[in-house]
């Protein structure tokens, strides 16, 4: 192996209780909320198709002009407790909040910059209110933090001169201070999800990314850190130059998922995917007709797909500038929540089954129980199941009904599992109780 000072500091999955809780949570929500919600994808009368939280970039708005949006930041309909209730009803176990996105506007009263909620008509510590409201509902809070900061004069995309080096050194100290501020002001935070770490300037400072991981883990025992923060001695990201995962879970699956047959390698480490409901909108965009908007069933399938491969899924919400959610997002949360109430036992605390994927849907596993999550019922009315050699199915019951399901062994380690008598009219779940053949 290549000797590394700033590579992975651990081989294999973390086995402590905090990481197990991260894993067991399985379903999270992303909140992308910042100044970008105010223009909602439109600038000087032109609507941009690109991601709304990148509007400053698409419309080439100078930072001092963009930050004037702070004068309009006054979300009168913001109600942290209502947000937390909506998350609980959706069945999410954690929420990732953009503390600061690329624009550099902070949802907490940071003392290291003037670009914070304090200096807006609204004034209040939005992040603090959200942390309390979600925690009061038993929901873990994760902090999204963008290292790239378009508002900071010392940010550099690359280091090409002594001046760059000195400026970026000041920038890294500023960033350390903000991270220490977040970790100490909000000690119940469970995770830091770093973004905006792809520039050469950060890849050339792998040491700093290793320092940040250690600093936060010293400040918040048990905290999890995503792989996207990390670069090693040679600028390799996510996986170090020896192929070992850095951070505590892989965070490369943004708006995409590993293939259930070809990408089974991901079951060897922890990972978390995140997804948008439109094709690519994280922040609030006023016009969702500009791209395809996934139905609740399409969102649900992605959630199950991730868990079936031993991953978490975070579904994104982009609150309106007034602090309320758009109707489509409220309906999505309700719809997912209704399903989770009936079938969530196949999601929470579940993992990759180790069984061969079948066309009718996905497997998840909890101990000796294997769940069949059926999205594509076959005309044959039989759900084919192939168990690993040495495993047999003892019993099959419907989840959310507890009715026995007939299973017929058709060949060695092959079974036909009957479909429920009455079509549930939605993706349904059958629990298989298994035992090892003696
Ligand atoms: C690119 C990019 C960013 N990464 C996603 C999680 C959003 O924050 C998007 O703006």
Image: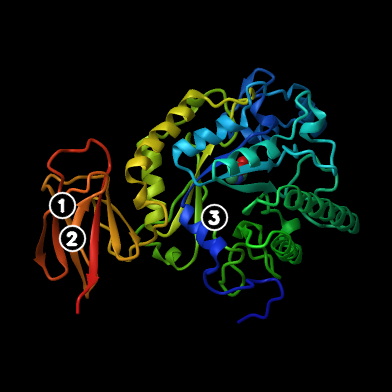
Q: Earlier in the sequence, mark 1 or mark 2?
A: 2
Q: Is residue 62 visible?
A: no
Residue farthest toward the top in the current orientation of the protein: 45
Q: At 73% from the left edge and 52% from the top edge, which residue is drawn?
A: 183
Q: What element does badge 3 sit on?
A: loop
Q: Quadrant of residue 120?
A: top right
User: Which quadrant does ligand 1 occupy?
Assistant: top right
Quote the CA–CA distance across marks 1 and 3. 40 Å
Between discs 1 and 3, the one toward the N terminus: 3
Question: Measured along the vertical axis of the image, is residue 39 above or below residue 209?
Answer: above
Disc 1 element: loop
Q: Which residue in the protein does label 1 denote?
A: 404
Q: Is residue 7 visible?
A: yes
Name the residue tied to disc 2.
Answer: 395
If the image is split into quadrants, where does the N terminus sit?
bottom right
Q: CA distance from mark 1 to mark 2?
A: 8 Å
Q: Residue at x 45, y 34 (%)?
A: 333
**CB of mark 1 within 8 Å of CB of mark 3?**
no
Q: Quadrant of residue 84?
A: top right
Compute the Cα span from label 3 to label 2: 38 Å
In percent of width and height, residue 249 lies at: 55, 61
Dot 1: within a 10 Å radius of its alpha carbon, few (fewer than 14), some, or many (20 or more) residues?
A: some
Disc 2 secondary structure class: strand
Callout 1–callout 2 Cβ contact below 8 Å: yes
Q: Earlier in the sequence, mark 3 or mark 2?
A: 3
Across and down, in percent, residue 224 comes to: 61, 59
Whole-percent x, y for residue 382 in the image? 13, 51
Mark 3 or 2: in front is: 2
Q: Which residue is mark 3?
A: 252
Dot 3 surroundings within 10 Å: few (below 14), some, or many (20 or more)?
A: some
Q: Residue at x 37, y 61 (%)?
A: 352
Question: 402 or 211: which is nearer to us?
Answer: 402
């Amino acid at each position: 192996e290549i000797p590394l000072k700033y590579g992975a500091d651990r081989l294999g999955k973390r086995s402590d209780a905090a990481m197990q809780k991260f894993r067991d949570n399985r379903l999270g929500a992303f909140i992308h909320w910042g100044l970008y919600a105010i223009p909602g994808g439109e600038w000087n009368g032109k609507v941009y198709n690109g991601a709304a939280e990148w509007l400053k970039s698409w419309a080439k708005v100078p930072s001092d002009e963009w930050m004037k949006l702070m004068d309009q930041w006054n979300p009168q309909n913001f109600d942290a407790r209502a947000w937390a209730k909506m998350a609980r009803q959706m069945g999410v176990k954690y929420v990732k909040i953009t503390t600061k996105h690329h624009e550099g506007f902070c949802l907490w009263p940071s003392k290291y910059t003037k670009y914070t909620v304090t200096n807006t008509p609204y004034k209040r510590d939005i992040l603090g209110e959200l942390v309390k409201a979600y925690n009061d509902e038993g929901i873990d809070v994760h902090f999204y933090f963008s290292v790239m900061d378009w508002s900071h004069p010392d940010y550099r995309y690359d280091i090409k001169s002594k001046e760059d080096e000195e400026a970026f050194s000041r920038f890294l100290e500023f960033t350390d201070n903000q991270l220490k501020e977040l970790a100490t002001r909000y000690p119940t935070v469970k995770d830091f999800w770093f973004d905006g770490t792809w520039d050469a300037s950060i890849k050339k400072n792998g040491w700093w990314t290793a320092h940040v991981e250690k600093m936060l883990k010293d400040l918040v025992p048990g905290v999890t850190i995503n792989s996207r923060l990390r670069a090693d001695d040679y600028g390799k990201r996510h996986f170090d130059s020896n192929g070992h995962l850095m951070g505590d879970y892989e965070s490369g699956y943004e708006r995409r998922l590993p293939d259930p047959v070809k990408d089974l390698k991901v079951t060897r480490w922890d990972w978390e995917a995140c997804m948008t409901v439109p094709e690519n909108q994280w922040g609030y965009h006023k016009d969702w007709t500009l791209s395809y908007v996934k139905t609740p069933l399409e969102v649900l399938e992605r959630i199950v797909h991730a868990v079936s491969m031993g991953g978490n899924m975070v579904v994104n919400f982009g609150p309106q500038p007034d602090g309320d959610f758009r109707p489509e997002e409220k309906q999505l949360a309700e719809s997912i929540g209704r399903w989770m109430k009936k079938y969530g036992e196949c999601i929470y605390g579940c993992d990759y089954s180790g069984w061969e994927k079948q066309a009718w849907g996905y497997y998840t596993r909890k101990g000796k129980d294997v769940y069949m999550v059926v999205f594509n019922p076959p005309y044959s009315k039989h759900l084919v199941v192939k168990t690993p050699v040495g495993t047999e199915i003892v019993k099959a019951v419907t989840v959310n009904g507890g009715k026995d399901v007939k299973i017929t062994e058709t060949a060695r380690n092959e079974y036909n599992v009957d479909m429920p008598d009455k079509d549930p009219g939605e993706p349904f779940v059958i629990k298989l109780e298994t035992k090892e053949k003696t």
